[in-house]
Every structure is written in C-alpha cells, then in structure tokens.
Image: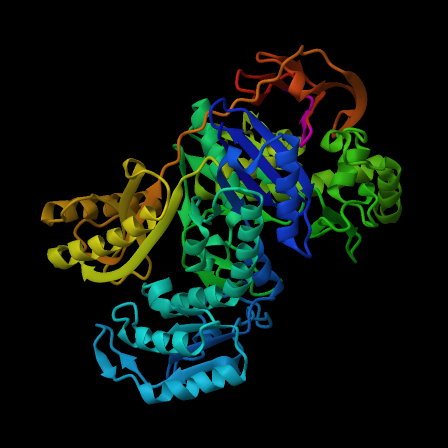
C-alpha cells in the first residue's frame, strides 16, 4: 500500500490530504495553523493525519508541501539582512525601479519599500557592454574590502547583480567564488544563476528577493525535513508557483519560485478535477480563512505569467505594476482578494459597511470560536444566517458559540447601522461576495472570456458556502464542489508533476539567427533540466522537456511566449515559430504584421517528470435522506427551512432540491433557492441553476 500526502498551510487551518494510489480513496486532517512556528503546525497536522488513518511513515510514497514562508517574509518585511553588490554606478537600481506607478495621477503615493537598505548596496569596478564584451575589467583587488565590510555588518545573505551578466557571467562567478569561500555560512545568490535574462531591474529584484527570503526558507525547510524524516516519511517536495513540485535543494537555489506555493496547488487540483470530469473550461475559486483566489483554466490549460509583483508595502497588488517587488519566475495567473472566512466586518468613518482586508486569522479567529476574537467575521455571519451548524464544524471537533457571533454583529455592525442582526449579517455577505465576484471577473470577463461557458470549481473551507451566489452573479450555470474541499489545495500537491522552468536571454532577429548557437543554447538548458530530473526518483520514461521562446516585433518593448519544436532548429522550424508568434500577437492584440521582422529575446525550457496518474474517488454510502432541518436566511427570500444532508452518506446519483445544506467534516455546501445538486459516481457534488427559483 502506498499513499501520497500533501500539506498546505492556510491562514486559519493547516490541511493534510491523503490519497491511496491503488484505490483512489482520500482522507483529510485539519489542525489550527500556528503562525508563531509554522513548522510545528505542519508536523502536528502530519501526526494527526497518520494517526487518524492508521498509517506508518513507510506507508507513504510521496510527500509534498505548500509553504507560505516566502510570502509572509515579503509581506511582513521580516527577511534576512541582505547586501547587494552591483556594477559601480548601479547600486540604486532597486530604488530607481521603472516609471510604472500604481496610481498614475497620485503625486503623493509612497513607492514600494526597498529590500536592501542603501548602506548595504555596494559597488565594484567592472563593466560589460550590451554584447557581453568586457569594457572595464573586474577589480579583483576590491573584493577583499567588500568581504571585510560584509563581515563587519553581519549580513545574512548576499545578492550579486552586474550589468549584462546574463550574457557573460565571468565577473559574477569570480566574485561569487570569493564570497562563498570567505563567508561559507552566508548564502550568495548570483543573478546569472538565478535569472540569466534581460532587464536589469527585474533581474536585480528577483535576485534580491531570493537572498532576502533564502535564509528563512532554508531554516524552515531543513527543520521540516528533519521532522518528517523522524516520522519515517519520504523526501519532502515543495510546490512551486508555476504549479509543479520540486525537491528542497532545488527550491533553495531559487527561493522566489515558491512565493505563491499554496494558491498554485489549488489551481492544479482544479485542473486535475476538470480532467476527471471531462470539463476543459473552469473557473477555480478558493476561499479560505484570510483570502479568496480565482484563476481561469481554458482548454484544460493553466495560464502562467512572469509579470508578477509581491510585497513592497500595504498597497501591493499582483496585477498592478509598481506596487511591489517584481519577480521574473513563472507564476500561475490568478487574482487574489482579502476575503475569507476570517475577514473582519467593520464600519468606516463614512458609515459604510466594509469587510476586510484585516482578518482574524488563526489567532484569535472568528468570534464564534471563543478564542479571544471580538470583531465579527464572515464566518460569524454565515453561522448567524444558519448556513453553518454550530455542532458540526470539523465533524463536531470545533466548538462554536452562535450567541457570541450574534452579540458581536449586533454591537459592531447592526447597532451602528440601525438595522437588525440578520440584516447586518446579510450585508456582510453581500459585501464579501461582491469582492470575490470581482476577482472572478478579473480572470474571466475582463480578459474577454464569457463566464457562461465555464464551470466554477469551488473549494477552500468557506468556498462552497458562497459558490452558488458568485455563480449567479457571473451567470455561471454550473458549480462543482470536489471531495475534501476544505483540504483541496493540499490534494493538488499530490496530483501534480515535478517541474522546473529554465530561461536565458538569446538576443537576435529570428530570420538572421545563428542556428548552431541557438541549438547549442537550447541544448545547454536541456542538459541542466535533465540533471535536475535525474535527481528525482521518477523513471526517465516519464520525463518531458518542452521548449518556448519569448518573441516580439523589432522595436517593441515586451514579448509574447510561443512554443518551439524539439530537435535541431533550422530555417523551416524558425519560420514556423515566427508564424506562431504572428498568430499569438493577433489573438492577443487583434492585429499582426507578418512582414515585420521578429526578434527573439529569451529561450525557455520546461522540464517535467510525471507521477503516476491518480484516480480520486470519494463516493458516499447510505441514503440520500435528509438528517434534519434548520432555518437559513437568503437574500430576497427571507427565512426558509432547509433540509440538511451528510455528504459522506450521499450515494452516487443522489439528487437534492433547494434550499438545502450539505455538511462534511471540512466544509459546508449551501444549495440556495434557484439551484439543485447531485452527487456523481466519484463523489463530486454538482450544482446547477434550476431556473425556477
């Protein structure tokens, strides 16, 4: 017997998903997240999961983890004391940034914070030109002085980024070797190793981010590795932002790869569910304790982007340029809003009801948890409206107090607004649903997609409660709630591939490219990719290498990425690549110019190793009879009596009419008026608009 285990840290709970490779049976365990020591919470969750399912460490064949350590360090600005060594005259590139501004006409906006303070941004004499040729030789006699300065200032990490080092890394390698010999306990990140790619600011920023979070991530993962090894578990893997998993040593070479580790896992799980159900067009919706995430899957393919910013202060937004620290690594393209079960409802100075961005998180949590929370949250509103059962959260293991929730909403919201508690709770739902619907619009309607052609996959501990309301808002006709929605992101950790992306700049006009040099460049990337795959335990027969290229018309500033065929590249293959670029340009911008020269900027290789495919099954056993009734309040309908069902007792083919509530250990599914639900043969709950409510 071999099981796969995935562990995902959420804002409120740490989730463990377990899958039996032979039968497809799945299990779940949840424990409260421990913000003061995330590793302790992960180990506690693993111990609970192994005990709950009577497993030993050697019953587990694969272990994967989604971590929030990198994101938290950047958002809270609690990374390592980092130094930057740059070409003389270029130490301020992190502060000068680009001209992009979050708010174009706000003259008083604060720029994003800088990860490396100016007194730790050092310079050395050296210079390359735009062809990678040496203009100023490296002043090796200055390295000793830099080392002495770094020692005296007790730096914890070092980033090295020289001008045009992506074309010629000789100077960076010399400095890196000297630093690593002199400071063996201080991690050194060279931009030519992290991101050998054009664009000085983005390359410097990505390298600085790696250095800033590297020591913290290394400490966390090494402690976690030791703890999982003590439990007898297999080697630990970590989910990368692009939707694949990697070994710990691989991750530590480029920590920026895991900045969106958890959200990526949920989208990968949704993609897996789409394949299982034969659904190619999906809207992935994940609502947890602190945030809600939305992503679009079209034709079975997950979109990724390298235009990503994180941290930098309170106004950071991943889809607005100029708000945070750019990292040029592939990240699954999703929209995220501060709207979760723990999001706090409050009244602003103008007397308007707001929800978020502050969250009660895991400590103290919603008021109804009785752990010291005093401000009403979305979970408190769901409880007061009758959507949640006070005696059934986490299968009854999580005691909640509905009267505490009522008093908090009455005191903080209903009283100031001069309305009743139920009306106030409905108002909280309206505000938070509007924010989450906007995230779904960003990834669908705002990008030219018709939401009516998609199916909403709803998960997260709070997602299935709000899913039907959001689907109505966007006219999405169908909602799928997968098994273990409360631990669904953890499930994605065991249903993905080992994967890493490689890139380097190869700057040339496509029809004048040196075919030999281009083939050699792809060959070098692929050789590095194969070395990475060889360190995995996956047989070579399941390895895959895919080529891509970043292209643009001459004199354009930004590129589009298109696939490149394998094998030797000659004039015919490059013409096919150019044609693919013209087509992609037309699809993206509405026009193309086949007579214009096409410029190659970067070449890319994606290396993947496929795990054995999983067939997940979680069909219930029993009858579809309701186990009870309770009153719930619905916008526009008032108080209605709802039939209550237990998900684990719903056999395949069960059909449920609204209004109804379907309860499981990890999540509650709300079937509001105007919807009907059914359970399929694999245990998926499918809700469809009935058009009669």
Tell me what residue is drawn at x 52 percent, y 65 percent. Answer: 215
Tell me what residue is drawn at x 12 percent, y 55 percent. Answer: 515
Is any atom of residue 651 visible in this view?
yes
**Residue 156 appears left or right of 164:** right
Task: Determine whether 97 is above or below 425 in the image.
Answer: below
**Residue 419 appears left or right of 362:** right
Location of the C terminus by quadrant is top right
* Residue 26, position as x, y percentages in the image: 56, 27
Magenta stretch holds residue 672? yes
Task: Choose between 302 and 651: the one closer to the eye.
Answer: 651
* Residue 631, position as x, y percentages in the image: 81, 23
**Residue 185 appears left or right of 486:** left
Magenta stretch holds residue 549? no
Magenta residues (range): 665-675
* Residue 658, position as x, y percentages in the image: 69, 18
* Residue 87, position as x, y percentages in the image: 36, 80
Report the coloring of the rendering: rainbow
Tell me what residue is drawn at x 72 percent, y 33 percent. Answer: 394
Tell me what residue is drawn at x 16 percent, y 44 percent. Answer: 567
């Amino acid at each position: 017997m071999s099981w796969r285990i995935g562990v995902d840290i959420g804002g409120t709970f740490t989730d463990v998903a377990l899958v039996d490779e032979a039968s497809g049976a799945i299990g779940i365990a949840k424990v409260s997240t421990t913000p003061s020591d995330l590793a302790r919470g992960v180990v506690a969750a693993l111990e609970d999961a192994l005990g709950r399912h009577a497993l030993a460490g050697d019953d587990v064949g694969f272990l994967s983890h989604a971590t929030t350590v990198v994101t938290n360090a950047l958002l809270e600005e609690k990374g390592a004391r980092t130094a930057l060594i740059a070409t003389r005259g270029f130490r301020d590139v992190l502060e000068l940034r680009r001209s992009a501004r979050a708010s174009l006409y706000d003259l008083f906006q604060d720029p994003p914070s800088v990860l490396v303070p100016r007194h730790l941004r050092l310079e050395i004499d050296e210079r390359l030109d735009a062809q990678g040729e040496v203009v100023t030789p490296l002043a090796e006699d200055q390295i000793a002085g830099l080392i002495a300065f770094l020692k005296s200032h007790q730096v914890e990490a070092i980033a090295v980024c020289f001008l045009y080092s992506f074309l010629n890394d000789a100077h960076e390698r010399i400095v890196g070797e000297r630093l690593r010999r002199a400071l063996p306990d201080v991690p050194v990140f060279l931009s030519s190793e992290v991101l050998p790619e054009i664009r000085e600011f983005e390359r410097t920023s990505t390298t600085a981010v790696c250095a800033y979070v590297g020591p913290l991530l290394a400490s966390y993962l090494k402690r976690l590795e030791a703890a999982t090894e003590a439990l007898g578990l297999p080697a630990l893997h970590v989910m990368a932002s692009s939707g694949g998993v990697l070994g710990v040593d691989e991750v530590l070479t480029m920590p920026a790869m895991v900045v969106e580790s958890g959200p990526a896992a949920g989208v990968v799980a949704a993609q897996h569910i789409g394949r299982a159900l034969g659904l190619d067009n999906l809207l992935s919706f994940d609502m947890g304790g602190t945030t809600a995430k939305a992503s679009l899957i079209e034709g079975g393919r997950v979109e990724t982007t390298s235009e990503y910013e994180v941290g930098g202060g309170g106004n950071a937004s991943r889809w607005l340029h100029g708000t945070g620290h750019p990292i040029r690594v592939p990240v699954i393209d999703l929209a995220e809003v501060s709207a979760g079960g723990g999001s706090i409802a409050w009244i602003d100075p103008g007397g308007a009801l707001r929800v978020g961005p502050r969250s009660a998180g895991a400590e103290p949590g919603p008021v109804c948890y009785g752990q010291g929370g005093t401000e009403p949250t979305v979970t408190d509103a769901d409880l007061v409206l009758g959507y949640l059962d006070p005696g059934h959260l986490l299968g009854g293991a999580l005691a909640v107090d509905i009267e505490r929730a009522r008093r908090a909403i009455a005191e903080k919201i209903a009283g100031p607004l001069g309305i009743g508690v139920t009306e106030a709770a409905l108002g909280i739902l309206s505000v938070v649903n509007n924010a989450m619907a906007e995230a779904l619009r960003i990834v669908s309607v705002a990008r030219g997609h018709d939401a009516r052609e998609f199916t909403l996959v709803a998960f997260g501990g709070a997602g299935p409660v709000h899913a039907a309301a959001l689907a109505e808002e966007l006219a999405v006709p169908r909602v799928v709630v997968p098994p273990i929605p409360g631990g669904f992101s953890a499930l994605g950790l065991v249903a993905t591939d080992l994967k890493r992306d490689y890139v380097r700049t190869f700057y040339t006009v496509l029809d004048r490219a040196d075919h030999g040099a281009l083939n050699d460049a792809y060959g070098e990337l692929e050789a590095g990719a194969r070395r990475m795959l060889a360190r995995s335990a996956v047989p070579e027969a399941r390895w895959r290498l895919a080529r891509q290229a970043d292209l643009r018309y001459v004199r354009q500033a930004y590129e589009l990425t298109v696939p490149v065929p394998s094998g030797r590249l000659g004039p015919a293959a490059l013409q096919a690549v150019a044609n693919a670029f013209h087509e992609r340009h037309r699809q993206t911008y509405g026009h193309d110019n086949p007579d214009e020269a096409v410029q190659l900027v970067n070449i890319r290789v994606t290396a993947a190793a496929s795990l054995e495919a999983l067939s997940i099954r979680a069909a219930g056993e029993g009858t579809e009879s309701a186990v009870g009734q309770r009153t719930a309040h619905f916008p526009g309908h008032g108080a209605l009596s709802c039939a209550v069902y237990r998900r684990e007792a719903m056999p395949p083919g069960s059909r449920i009419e609204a209004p109804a509530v379907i309860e499981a250990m990890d999540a509650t599914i709300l079937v509001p008026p105007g919807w009907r639900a059914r359970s399929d043969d694999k245990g998926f709950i499918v809700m469809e608009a009935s058009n009669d409510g």
